[in-house]
Image: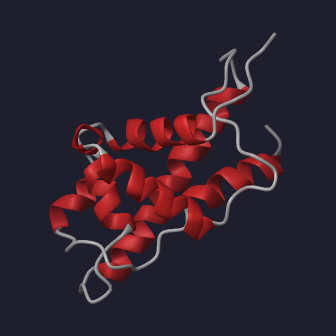
Amino acid sequence: MTFKGWTAAVAVLLACGPGVGHAVTEANFAAKTTGDIVELCDPQSDSAMANAAVNFCSGFAQGTVSLEMEHDAGSRSMKLFCLPDPAPTRNEALAEFVKWARASPERLNATAVDGLIRFLGERYPCPKRR
């Protein structure tokens, strides 16, 4: 994937901004589950930890996407997701991720990395090879 593609992938997940979400707790910062990341990416705007949550979400998302891009550039023969060109805006992608994760309670229990990658794969699947 090109640098432009990598930048777009990061942008998809870096849209974390204070919203009308749930109360963030210190436990969410362990980022063990997709539910933790959802809470960090969509904190209540009046939460004392909202800014820290948004910043953590951004860094976690960037790290996850960067790692996946490194795998794609390495030995993996099949990419797990392919972003469209142009990529969605940050706010659109984040809203979709939060909605996707909250739509099925079992998704919230997945590991944080698995949840982010699974969302990207379902939302932005790669074309089938012939």
Q: Residue furthest bottom?
A: 46
Q: Viewer-proximal residue, 103 or 8?
A: 103
Residue 3: x %, y % from top left: 81, 48
Residue 112: x %, y % from top left: 35, 44
Is residue 31 in view?
Answer: no
Q: Residue at 41% x, 72% y: name it.
A: 54
Q: Is residue 11 left or right of residue 16?
A: right
Residue 33: x %, y % from top left: 27, 45
> Colour scheme in the image?
secondary structure
Q: Residue at 48% x, 69% y: name it.
A: 16
Above or below, 10 relative to 79: below
Q: Residue furthest front?
A: 103
Q: Is residue 75 left or right of residue 46?
A: right
Residue 80: x %, y % from top left: 60, 28
Q: Quadrant of the N terminus?
A: top right
Q: Quadrant of the C terminus?
A: top right
In which image quadrant can residue 126 be found?
A: top right
Number of numbered discs overlaid on the protein picture = 0
Q: Residue at 31% x, 74% y: name it.
A: 43
Q: Viewer-proximal residue, 43 or 30?
A: 43
Q: Residue furthest top?
A: 130
Above or below, 8 relative to 72: below
Q: Is residue 59 left or right of residue 38?
A: right
Q: Residue at 31% x, 38% y: name it.
A: 111
Is residue 59 in view?
Answer: yes
